[in-house]
Image: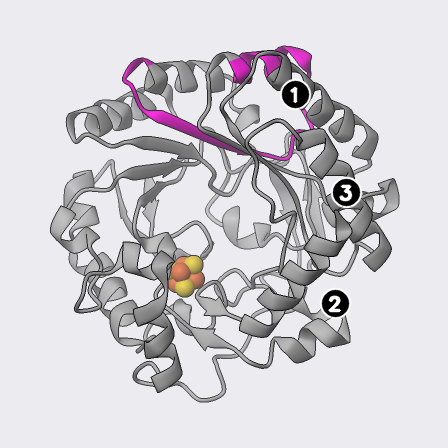
Amino acid sequence: MSNIQYDEQGGIVSLENQLEGHCKSRKKEKKHYSFLERLMIKKSRRLNYLLDGDGKYKCRQERLPNVIRIGPTNRCTAQCFYCPREHIHEAGSGYMDFEMYEEIVTWAEKNKVKAISFALFGEPLLHPRFFEMLELAREKGMALRVSSNAIIMDKEKANKLLDMNLEAMEMSLDGYVSHEFREGKRVDKHERVKENIEYLLSEAKKRKSKTVFNVHFVDAGNVSKKNKKRFVKYWSEKLNGLEHITSFYYEPHNWAGTRADVGAKINWLDKLLKKFELKKPCVYIKGINIDWNGNVVICTNDPTKEAVIGNIKQAKLEDIYNGETRMKYLSAHETGNFRELNCRKCNVNSYWPLLFIKKRIVNYFSK
Ligand code: SF4
C-alpha cells in the first residue's frame, strides 16, 4: 500500500506511490455465461427480481431508478486497510453542496424515487448538514438508508438518526476486540464505536424502532475464528428484539480489481472454497449513485475514473441513467461478456456456493 497522510477529517493531504494493488483480469475472459451460471441466473429468486424472463434488466423498461445512493462526502473517519481510498480521493475530496442535494431530492420526488441511501465511499455523518439532508428526503416521503462506521455517532447523533425512522442502518465494526478493530480500521476507536452502537440499539429498542439494523465486519483476515463466533453471538444478543440482518460478516471484495491484495489474508479453507466461482449479473447497476462532486458512478464498488458515467452539473440525471454508457454495462451483465469493463476484474458479481454454505453452517452453530 502507498504511504498516505490524512488531515483530521480523512482527506488525503499526501499520497506517495500512487494506486497500487490492481488485480489481473480473470484468467480466461469469457464472452458469455457458462451453462451453470445461466442455470443459477434462471433459478435465483434474487436475480429474477432484477431480470425479466429474457434475462434483461427490468430497469431498462422502468427508465428511472427506485433508489438513489448518495455520497455526502468522500472523506472518512477511519482508514480501513481494505479501502481503495487512493482512487476515491484521486480527483480530490470534499462535501456535497446542499443546493446540489436539494436538486437531487426534487428530481427524486418528481420521478417517484422510493429511497435515498447514504452509502457511497465516505462517512456520511461527517457532512455538516447531514441531518438536514435526511430531513429533506423524509419530508418528501422517501425511505432512508444510512451506512456508517459509527465512530462519530455520539448520543446526540444516534437519537437524531432514530428520529428519522430510517428504513435501514448499517454499521461496520471491524472486529470483536480492540486490536482486530485497529488492524481493520487503522484507528484506535473500538471501545467508542462499540458503545455508540450499543447506545443506538438500546434506544432503538425503547422506541420500538422498525429500522432494519446491520452490524458487521469485513472478513479480511484480521478477526480470529473464535472472535468471529463471539462477534455473531454478542451482536445477535444486542440486536435481539430489533429487525436485523443476520449476515454478520462479509467476504472482502476487490473494488473492481483495484484491491487484489485484500482477499489474500483469508484462511486456506475459504480460499479453497472460493475456487468454485460463478459469475452473475450485478445488482449494483440497478440504481444510481451520485458522489459528493456530482459525478454519477455506475456502482458503489468501482472507485476508478472509468466508473464515472456522467456528472449532474453537465447532464440531466435521466439522460445519464438511460445513456449509452450505462446501457453498455447492462448488456455486458446480461450476456456475461465483461471484457471491456472493470467488471471483468471485479468479484462483486461473483458467487461462491461452497463458501456460502460454510458460512450458514458456522453462523448457525455460533448462536
Ligand atoms: S461488477 Fe461492475 S458494476 Fe458490479 S460492483 Fe463490480 S465494477 Fe461495479
Asked if ligand 1 lies within 8 A of label 1, the reply is no
Residue 266, given in percent of the width and then of the height, sits at 73, 67
- Observer-nearest residue: 142 or 78? 142
Which residue does the numbered mark 1 point to in the structure image? 200
Which of the 4 image quadrants contains residue 235? top right
Which residue occupies 46% across, 15% down? 164
Which residue occupies 56% across, 41% down? 245
Residue 255, given in percent of the width and then of the height, sits at 52, 60
Q: Quadrant of ligand 1?
A: bottom left
| Residue type at tag 1 | Leu
Whole-Å distance between the Cαs marked 2 and 1?
32 Å
Asked if ligand 1 lies within 8 A of label 3, the reply is no
Residue 74's place in the image compared with 43, above or below, is: above
- Observer-nearest residue: 219 or 127? 219
The answer to whether 73 appears left or right of 66 in the picture is right
Whole-Å distance between the Cαs marked 2 and 3?
24 Å
Boundaries of the magenta span: 139-162
Q: Is residue 226 visible?
A: yes
First along the sequence among labels 2 and 3: 3
Which residue occupies 70% across, 38% down? 236
Q: Residues within 10 Å of mark 1 (few under 14, many from 20)?
A: many
Residue 58, given in percent of the width and then of the height, sits at 20, 55
First along the sequence among labels 3 and 1: 1
First along the sequence among labels 2 and 1: 1
Element under label 2? helix
Which residue does the numbered mark 3 point to in the structure image? 233
Element under label 1? helix
Q: Is residue 8 visible?
A: no
| Residue type at tag 2 | Lys
